[in-house]
Image: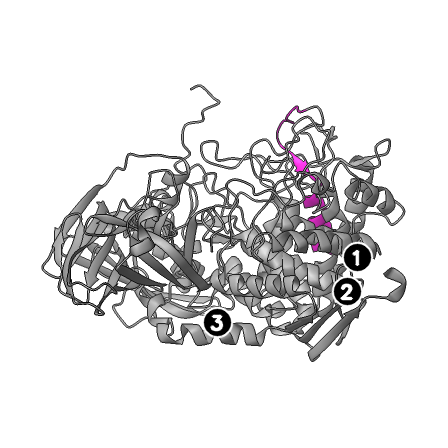
Amino acid sequence: MRDIAGTVACIDGNTFMVSDTAGDVASSPSTPVGLFAADTRFLSRWRLTVNGECMTALSVDDSQYFEVTFFVVPGAAVDYVEADVSAIRRRRIGPDLTESLTIFNYGERDMTLDVRLEVAADFADIFEIKFDIGDKSGEHYTHVGPNELRLGYRRGTYRREVVVSASEPAEFDRGGLRFAVRLRPGQQWSTRLQAAMLALRPDGVDLRAALRALRPDDSTLPRSVQAWVAAAPTLDTESVGLQQVYHRSLVDLAALRFAPLSLSGASVPAAGLPWFMTLFGRDSLLTCLQTLPVTPSLTPPTLRILASLQGARSDDVLEEDPGRILHELRYGESAAFEEQPHSPYYGTVDASPLFVVLLDEYERWSGDTALVTELEQEARAALAWIDRYADLTSTGYVWYQRRNRATGLDNQCWKDSWDSISYADGRLPGFPRATCETQGYAYDAKIRGARLARTFWGDPAFADRLESEAAALYERFNRDFWLEDRGFYALALDHDGTPVDSLSSNIGHLLWSGIVPPERAPRVVEHLMGPALFSGWGVRTFAEGQRRYNPLGYHNGTVWPFDNSFIAWGLRRYGFSNEAARIAEGILSAATYFEGRLPEAFGGFDRETTRFPIRYPTAGSPQAWSSGATMLLIRTMLGINPHDDHLAVDPALPTTFGRIALLDIPGRWGKRDAFARQRPDQR
Amino acid sequence: MSATSAFFERLTVAGQDPRFSKVCGSVRFDIRDDGHLEQWLLDIDHGRMRVTRSGGPATTVIQVSAQVAEAMARGEVNGLAAITRGEIMVDGDLALALRIGRLFPREPGRLQRDDPDSGT
């Protein structure tokens, strides 16, 4: 997993370790390398030396996400030609870090080796690293024992600790441990290192003790990954690249599964490495929507945990309101002491409608009516939130304006950076703001909520009401957001109702939600596939020609695979199969340049000019909704849709793929296959 | 009367909460004040709630200091944050504990920090 150049990641849900290619960690305060769990860095230094020399990587095997093997030799790169000593570090992430270290003497002389592991723990909160905040309020402590090194951090009743030990006798000191190793020619030596991570309550019990007790034994992990892959449909295609992307995406979705504290052991997707290794409302809902044909088991626990943490009261710090679905949940020090509002933070306007959209879509695939009944109350509350709490100007739209003025988010839509919503001339609108795609989600939620109410909740009156509200929203939206002279929808409405006139990828989501009248769709599609938005790889977040456009602007010009997958779904909904296929081809081809792993985003540069996709400097990878994008793009190419009790297939392949078959697609129909073959007339 | 006692009195009087219509379980609060232990047992059966001062067995036990219990009853505590920092200790079903947390009031302006734009 070498996505951020020169680093290797080992992952198990929200526990992960990022090191250099030799396996070492020597972190600086503002780089997200080290061993992390629950949003806290438990090891900020983990560096192996032999006779004072650092290790150099010969090769790295990271084919299993939870295990990485480093083949290393002492000395700088130029020296290892005649290396007599070499080593293997086999690292595994589970509840703890374990690392088996084996040292070989292939020389002809006896060797006396000073094997040293430098260890330090700064217990930095992920937000301290992100914002480069160095000073901590609590105190660090160190206990050196005969058989372990215990590093801790305490602030009031908050305590985190890491305990480093080894299976072979070692000499421990405050900065690490050391082994005196004597090796005859041809001999080898091994030890098993362990770093146990503890989140301790005042009574000495780990906060996560109950959860950990539910975790299956670690020895079952390789088999459980095989089972995860085996349970998913099989992709049969002649395209080696597509095979690689599919397999990588499937395994990365497994890697990012984690069991939140309050869910009795069930696992949900964490959003992505390294900054978002936790539960996000929007990311998890969209990931589930993308992956329903492939890994539907992600959806019920995701809906359940979001339901269990649904807003119940009004709180200006958390931006909580009754019925609101959360944005972000964290367990680090900044959340614990409410310096950041993430326990949980509710500052998103799309998670609530998307909750209802996913519940409906899931039922269409699975036929799981029990879940629809179980979550009726929560789905109704989410629908009520749209009208009761999100319409800040009483104009019938979902608006946002942060109430937490210190640490809340300015923009509470998926493009949540501070400058993502601007006029074509670069001006920033005032608050509150209503972005276009959110209105589409709200429309879709009402339509789908009406189906749930009529079919499963026995409440036709509520269904009628939702449908008439949806119809009114459709009318209103198409009057207020449509820019007739430009032929597309405004990105947002300013606080006074003025349309924010920039051209953005957001209009593609409107097709997915179905809020675009069919007669307007061709003009919208022309923009999406035109040179200002379409880079050749995919649709840019923000169009060339807008004042704030930048091909490396996080939300102002890069290409996001997840964004494109929903646009492609929307294009197919309106019958633009060739255009959807062009997007699928572009994004899936880009993936092959990232070893099959789609990053969060990549540069918006023109494909013709650069020939390969340009890495976005701090893009997260793996990223759940980027892995999910692969699945949704395959769905759109195959044109698979649940239709009553069967699976409808209506393929439209890009010319690059001759044949795609997805076998054993699970759903209410049992298991079905979908086949797609290039039509001769398209060649 | 303490805010904690008043809180449990209110629950006793209310007797039910439609938000818990699908919830069954029991939660015991062990509230410690120096050497003194005060225990409240909350039984929930499909939304019907029964509150007793009892140390009987429960599926979930919540341990807090009297000081934290008072703050909770006044609506000043974020339960999840307090669990993460070790101020509230939960044994048993954490999901149920978090659901029960919704029974506690919340001060809407709780901890709202200085507004950098307001200049006050």
Considering the numbered disc 1 on the image, is that residue within a helix, a strand or a loop?
helix
Q: Earlier in the sequence, mark 2 or mark 3?
A: 3
Compare residues A515 and A223 and report the one nearer the observer.
A223
Have a look at marks 3 and 1 and say if they share a chain. yes
Q: Amino acid at mark 2?
A: Gly
Residue at mark 2 to residue at mark 1: CA–CA distance: 8 Å
Q: Nearer the viewer, residue A663 or A392?
A: A663
- Report x, y in % for residue A177: 17, 54
Look at discs 3 and 1 and give the one toward the viewer.
3
Mark 2 = which residue? A639
Report which residue position mark 1 lands on.
Answer: A572
**Could you say which is closer to the camera, residue A312 or residue B91?**
B91
Label 2, secondary structure: give it. Answer: loop
Q: Amino acid at mark 1?
A: Arg
Which label's residue is closer to the chain start, 2 or 1?
1
Q: Which residues are magenta?
A: A426-446
The answer for which chain carries disc 3 is A
Q: In front of the other: label 2 or label 3?
A: 3
Asked if marks 2 and 1 touch (Cβ < 8 Å), the reply is yes
Q: Earlier in the sequence, mark 3 or mark 1?
A: 3
| Rendered image coloring scheme | one colour
x and y percentages locating residue A383 in the rendered image: 65, 53
Residue A139's x, y, as percent? 20, 41
Residue sitting at x 71%, y 44%: A539
What residue sits right under mark 3 in the picture? Answer: A225
Q: Residues within 10 Å of mark 1 (few under 14, many from 20)?
A: many
| Quadrant location of the C terminus of chain A in the rendered image | bottom right
Type of amino acid at the residue the image marks with label 3: Val
Please check whether the numbered discs 2 and 1 fall on a single chain. yes
Left or right: A166, with A552 as reference point: left
Task: Determine whether label 2 and label 3 are within 8 Å by CB.
Answer: no
